[in-house]
Amino acid sequence: MNQLPLLVRREFWEHRAFLIAPAIVAVFWVLVAITAGIFGQVHVDELPAGLMSHPDLVEKAPKALAVALGTLTLPFVIVMGVVIVFYLLDSLYADRRDRTVLFWKSLPVSDQETVLSKLATAAVVLPVLIFVGALITSVLVGLIASLRLSWEAGSGIWPLVWNSGVWFPAIALFLYMLIVAVLWYLPIFAWFLLVSASAGRAVMLWAALPPLGLMFVEKMVFHTGHFASLLADRLVGWKDLALNSGADGDHVMIIDGERIPFSSHLGDVLDPATFFSSTGLWVGLIVAAGLIWATVLVRRHRSEV
Amino acid sequence: MTATIEMRGVSKSFKQLKALDNVSFTAQPGRIVGLIGPNGAGKTTALRAILGLTNYQGELKVLELDPYTQRDRLMQEVCFIADVAVLPGWMRVHQAVQFVAGVHPRFRRDRAEEFLSRTTIKRSSRVRELSKGMITQLHLALVMAIDARLLVLDEPTLGLDIIYRKQFYETLLSDYFDHERTILLTTHQVEEVENILTDLLFIDRGRIVLDSSMEDVAANFVQLTVNPDHVAAAREFKPFYEREVFGRTVMYFHNAAADALRRLGEARTPSVADLFVAKIKGAAA
């Protein structure tokens, strides 16, 4: 019997933030769009002939649209990123703290399935939710914007908003980045799960102190910073590998001060070959597998705080 | 018939402390076994080992499975209630039913619904909104709807009103228990379960100090309130424990000649609580 769907559902019952957090972001953007629509200054009495093919508009409108889509998406990623981190740290700790672990363990669900259901929730279901939430919101905001614009200038202006040459590559880029980032961050997810399964208290501290301590000790003893740069690479390294930063595209999204390129020619931007053949990815995945395995063993043994 | 629980030479230590010290016993189907001991005697550790929540040295088979490595399979046929506080507060009643129905192949949803319909519990309530008595009823409804072969109860009535306590055991006996199931329970309220137990297991400092059916207790143990002038004569029969009650000496005998003892005072079968005190204190002396 495959219990995974029910186990994941259970996580949604317990953590209502999974749905509330993206809903708040979505409502925020829709309100921003409506407010801008009401108070924004749009004065176009009638669409001038030849405007839609004016070189300035042809060049700048897609860029503006791509920037808008990137901007809409970013808060979903940030908010859900925070939700995922807190969820992972809490997932195997909260039930030990309030002793409900004894109830969960009285059911015929193996520790392996339990741990995997938490990982699947964080690494698959929640990223899908980020994607769907951002997509729906983008469409809603697009609808509001195009309704407002056509109020002034007629439906001739719609192709500016619904430029499929921007939408489809933007959606594909976003999906690609989500997948790549989750794979790259998997050892961090697994580390959080292990801490959550083993810590007696102060989960947050246990998650942060060992890496910081290791950095400190290395600095003191060897006067080097290999571990620190390893960690830094684990946080941002995927972008250099997975995206062709030299691509001749426009920069539309900025994450951690780094510009994410955008081009309607996806092939210029995505570099899956380099990413999937990188040592960093595979070493990370092996480390993640090891940490997950350790988490299952700890979960089997530790029923109490 | 194969035994439900078979423990042979099981030991478990926490640093210096020996929580279980070479413990052996078996529990058969159709029995209600009371595992009784002072705090820290190893009761909970024994239950944990049986439920696969802790590892141990020695040999232990529950329903012919190894609990520690096969917990998920074992839990298809074993239920346990640790204490009433362990249902998650965020869960709604209908979610609890749905979840157990989804993960438990032997759960009969209609039975759970029937038990619940006898209570005032609302399906949409969260567990944290229920009273302690209601949470017990919910937990019991979930557990009794599972066609399990072993039910383990660890202090199930702790913190409950006396009304719910009585109800708890009555429901258990009338609606759940039959000759194919085994119930293993621990409790501090020995008087409460005295009449429903079929077997007694006393545990003290990690060791089993008594393993007996209730019939054997009645046949083999005598509590004698000794007439003041026969104290010396009674001691000849080697009581394993004696104490003073209102100026009279009460002695406890195992396998002594009951007829001879009856001439020395008032003889009767000791209550479980008295026998427990006698056994633990007698062993300590």
Image (cartoon, helix red, strand yellow):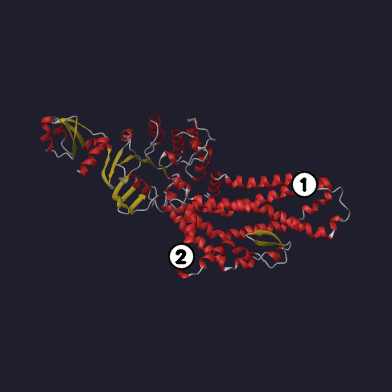
Q: Characterize the local packing of mark 1: few (<14), some (14-19) or many (20 or more) Cα atoms within 10 angstroms.
A: few
Decide if residue A128 is in sight here.
yes
Question: B158 above or below A29?
Answer: above
Quarter of the image holding residue B249?
Answer: top left
Query: Which of marks 2 and 1 precedes in the sequence?
Result: 1
Letter of the chain that mark 2 sits on in the rendering:
A
Residue corresponding to mark 2: A217
Along the viewing direction, whichever of B74 and A292 lies nearer the viewer: A292
Local SS, label 1:
loop
Q: Are marks 1 and 2 in contact (CB under 8 Å)?
A: no
Percent coordinates x, y for residue B154 in the rendering: 37, 41
Percent coordinates x, y for residue A140 in the rendering: 72, 47
Residue corresponding to mark 1: A40
* Number of the label disc, if any, that sits on residue A77: none
In the image as oriented, which residue stretches furthest toward the right?
A49
Query: In 3D space, how far apart are the residues under numbered discs 1 and 2 (Cα atoms)?
Result: 56 Å
Percent coordinates x, y for residue B185 in the rendering: 35, 40
Q: Quarter of the image for the C terminus of chain B: give it.
A: top left
- Give the residue type at disc 1: Gly
Q: Quarter of the image for the N terminus of chain B: give it.
A: top left
Decide if residue A194 is in sight here.
no
Q: With A241 as the anchor, is A104 left or right in this view?
A: left
- Residue at 56% in and 59% down: A185
- Residue at 24% in and 37% down: B275
Q: With B280 as the anchor, is A114 left or right in this view?
A: right
Question: B21 above or below B136?
Answer: below
Letter of the chain that mark 1 sits on in the rendering:
A
